[in-house]
Image (tube, helix red, strand yellow):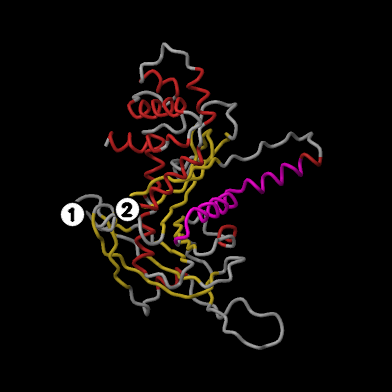
Amino acid sequence: MSEHLDRLLADTAGTFASPEDHRRVRTQWLAGLLNLGRHTVTGALTTAGQQQRDWSADYRVWQRLPVDPLFGQLQQHTLARSTGPWVVALDDSATRKTGRRIPGCGWRRDPLSPPFHVNFHWGQRVLQCSAALPAPDGSARLVPIDWTEAPLPKKPSRQAGPEEQAAYAEARRQANLNLLAARRLAHLRTVTDRPIHFVVDGRFTNRTVLRQLPDNTVIIGRIRKDTKLYAPVAPTKRPGRPRRYGEVGPTPEELRTDEKIPWQQVPAWAIDRAHPFKLKATGPVMARIRGVTAPVRIVVIAPLGYRLRQGSRLLYRQPAYLLCTDPELPLERILQEYLWRWDIEVNFRDEKCLLGVSE
């Protein structure tokens, strides 16, 4: 493993301004993996046995770090190790910070807070994309290929003038997380000519992202159970403004509870083996999302049963409702790619707990 990692680090030498910069960054990267304390520059230098040397050059080298070329190499590596559509998961998170003068920091909602009491923590908002590396058995490991900070602009004081208030309102609109996600999707679209399947949660299944979806790109995301669905509009020669929606159809929740529509059993890899999942699908239909005029496919995943211990009663999780912008995509692929998305949450955990990205 160490030889493979060293070979990957050696491939990045051409992206740095000088061999000395690459040597310093490589030393800190390797030392950061062995550091048992806080993952800071000081901790990495101490682990590498350089605590008695001048640290000025080691701190300044991070200001010249070629972030985009480094992620570009990761993107090419994942493309070379996969075939077919490029499956990319997209999600946001907040990294904890302690300094009050760090740019882009603010009070963020803690996702680990209990549902009856919302907690907040001080940190930065980030957006990450992870590409899937499929295995022959159907599983996949997601590798981060894009990392973008998503700070909010500083709010002006109450005594600020109208021009400053208007500038803040415009900067706030441009800093919208969905707009940033759409820009990152457009950036990844320029990396390859292969089809790209973006897998997202309900946070990004909205008109801001769907209206700016590039060509040859598919989005698989969660939707609300009460999303309004309509039949496609048949072309007519009637005068007046053309209709955008046809007859009203059942909502995803009504589709799930309709006993006349049978469940389909579809196998997919999850956790450590293949599991049978029960699905219901409808499409092509029109979803009532403003600005989205193309037909989509709706997939309902039945809640899975589980037991807290052997012999206990069977409990059930919540059902999932998915939207796919490609009505012709097979159910097996929609389900499997959506299950792969969970690994981006594992990426965030490893980055924060093991690599110390927020430190």
Q: Which residue is mark 1?
A: 311
Q: Residue at x 38, y 50 (%)?
A: 78
Q: Residue at x 55, y 81 (%)?
A: 247
Asked whether 194 or 335 is in front, the reply is 194
Q: Main secondary structure of the magenta part?
A: helix
Q: Can you tell which of label 2 and label 1 is closer to the viewer?
A: 2
Q: Which residue is mark 2?
A: 140
Image coordinates of residue 114 in percent, x first then y, are: 44, 42
Give amino acid for label 1: Gly
Image coordinates of residue 121 in percent, x first then y, are: 51, 34
Asked whether 336 or 71 is in front, the reply is 71
In-image side of 11 versus 287 (left or right) = left
Q: Is residue 190 magenta?
A: yes
Residue 5 image-quadrant placement: top left
- Dot 2 alpha-carbon crowd within 10 angstroms: few under 14, some 14 to 19, many 20 or more: many
Q: Which residues are magenta?
A: 165-194
Query: Can you say whether 37 is above or below 5 in the image?
Result: above
In-image side of 36 versus 222 (left or right) = left
